[in-house]
Amino acid sequence: MFKDQRGFTLIEMLIVLMIISVLIILIVPNLSDKSREVYDKGCNALVSVVQAQVDAYFIEQKTYPLDMAELQSSGYITAEQDTCPDGTVLTISETGVVSQ
């Protein structure tokens, strides 16, 4: 009566769902660990960009900016560039731009 029906059996579907579940269990924890690494790399990249802008300010003005507000008011950085993606504030110190 039902000889020519094609499709998946219940056992095949359960095996596929089990394999997908195992893959999700293995992958999701690794992704959450990477988010901190991504924030750190993003912050380091932003520090490099802002340091380049401090150097450009020095080349044009012959003096270093006193703080981030001076660099921002002169148009070298935007308002979003004074904090890292994780909320760490950037400051200008004697050694250069640092994240605190």
Image (cartoon, rainbow, N blue to C red):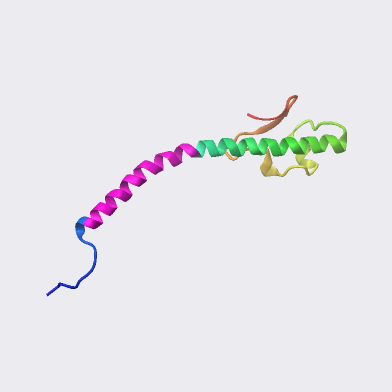
Please give the name of the residue rendered at 24% of the width and 66% of the height, measured from the top-left corner.
7
**Left or right of residue 83: residue 12:** left
Please give the name of the residue rendered at 40% of the width and 39% of the height, measured from the top-left corner.
29
Q: Position of residue 47 (x, y in %)?
A: 67, 35
Asked whether the viewer can see residue 38, the reply is yes
The magenta segment: 12-34
Nearer-the-camera pick, 88 or 8: 8
The quadrant in which the N terminus is found is bottom left
Asked if residue 17 lies in the magenta stretch, the reply is yes
Asked if residue 32 lies in the magenta stretch, the reply is yes
Nearer-the-camera pick, 72 or 43: 43
Please give the name of the residue rendered at 66% of the width and 43% of the height, measured from the top-left corner.
80
**Residue farthest top in this picture:** 94
Nearer-the-camera pick, 21 or 88: 21
Quadrant position of residue 81 = top right
The quadrant in which the C terminus is found is top right
**Left or right of residue 39: residue 33:** left
**Left or right of residue 74: residue 85:** left
Q: Main secondary structure of the magenta part?
A: helix
Please give the name of the residue rendered at 75% of the width and 37% of the height, measured from the top-left corner.
52
Asked whether the viewer can see residue 83, the reply is no
**Residue farthest front in this picture:** 4
Q: Position of residue 69 (x, y in %)?
A: 75, 37
Task: State how many labels appear.
Answer: 0
**Residue farthest left in this picture:** 1
